[in-house]
Image (cartoon, helix red, strand yellow):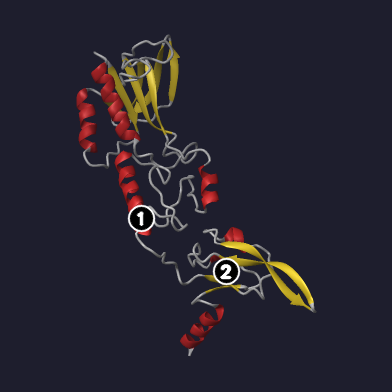
Amino acid sequence: MVNASGPTGGKIKRPSDGKIPQAVAFIKCVGSRDDVKGRSYCSRACCMYTAKHAMQVVEKIPDSDAYVFYMDVRTAGKGYEEFYQRSVNAGAQYIRGRVSKIYPHGDRLVVKSEDTLLGKPIEVEVDMVVLATAMVPAAGSADMAKLVGFSIDKDGFFQEAHPKLQPVETFTGGVYLAGSCQGPKDIPDTVAQASAAAVKVAALFSKDKLATEPMIAQVDETKCTGCEFCIPICPYQAISMKPLKTRVHSHTVERQVATVNKGLCQGCGACVAACRPCALNLNGFTNDQIVSEVDALCL
């Protein structure tokens, strides 16, 4: 609305009747930080864009009021606290309390809440209410993760390999994350993460040969029964089935056995633990090697 080339020509107007509001209420954490009815996480960017919107209302509409209902104000980025203070100094009124009810009163809206700092209930009559809703994963993101071969977290965002040591990498080699697909974040964090992902990709392209993990799974085709139980277990989609012809009593019999893609396998060992006929082993950590190690330690 404040964009000069936008639908209202840069003027803040109510979508219902086009009236310029003289009082606007902003409600933060709508659907966020709520384990029962919403999302348990903080969407991170809401506090700052709400501060910007409240300041724009006060500056662009003469003699207007901007009320911001909040649980907590989180300003973790560089210069964020100063910007929040600018919003307060510009005239935005911050009220700490959860909104319990919004109901119409004529052509206006009444916002019923509480001021927990003063310890008393409060009602504010406004012309427009703006909600800062939770940032959620894009539709179809779970299907995309399943297709590419990496996991999602409990909230539906793409899961990184390690939050500190590998924040832009996934469990699938060569696939990197950047932006809010990995979790709620604002523009500076997104740009930094995108730069890190680009460097990871450039590092791959700078080499003539790709170094792979030596401790990968291997299949004993004589033991494999072709049950395919290992395929959904593998988080890297490195296992598939292939046909194998064997001679049985002068007859050729074709059966399906598992095969491991050496370029995709990361040596996690999940398939080894899940293999029922014990046809899978991990190079360097075979069952015989582990038993021998235990025997040597027990001497």
Depicted 183 relative to depicted 237: above or below:
above
Q: Is residue 55 left or right of residue 290?
A: left
Q: Are marks 1 and 2 in contact (CB under 8 Å)?
A: no
Binning the other alpha carbons within 10 Å of mark 2 as few (below 14), some (14 to 19) or many (20 upward) gives few
Mark 1 lies on residue: 200
The amino acid pointed to by label 2 is Ala
Element marked by disc 2: helix
The amino acid pointed to by label 1 is Lys
Which quadrant of the view contains residue 59? top left
Q: Nearer the viewer, residue 213 or 53?
A: 213
Q: Is residue 165 visible?
A: no
| Residue 248 % position (x, y) | 77, 77
Depicted 193 relative to depicted 73: above or below:
below
Task: Tell me the CA gap for discs 1 and 2.
Answer: 31 Å
Mark 2 lies on residue: 273
| Residue 146 % position (x, y) | 54, 50
| Residue 296 % position (x, y) | 48, 87
| Residue 131 % position (x, y) | 40, 27
Q: Nearer the viewer, residue 239 or 141?
A: 239
Depicted 174 relative to depicted 68: above or below:
below
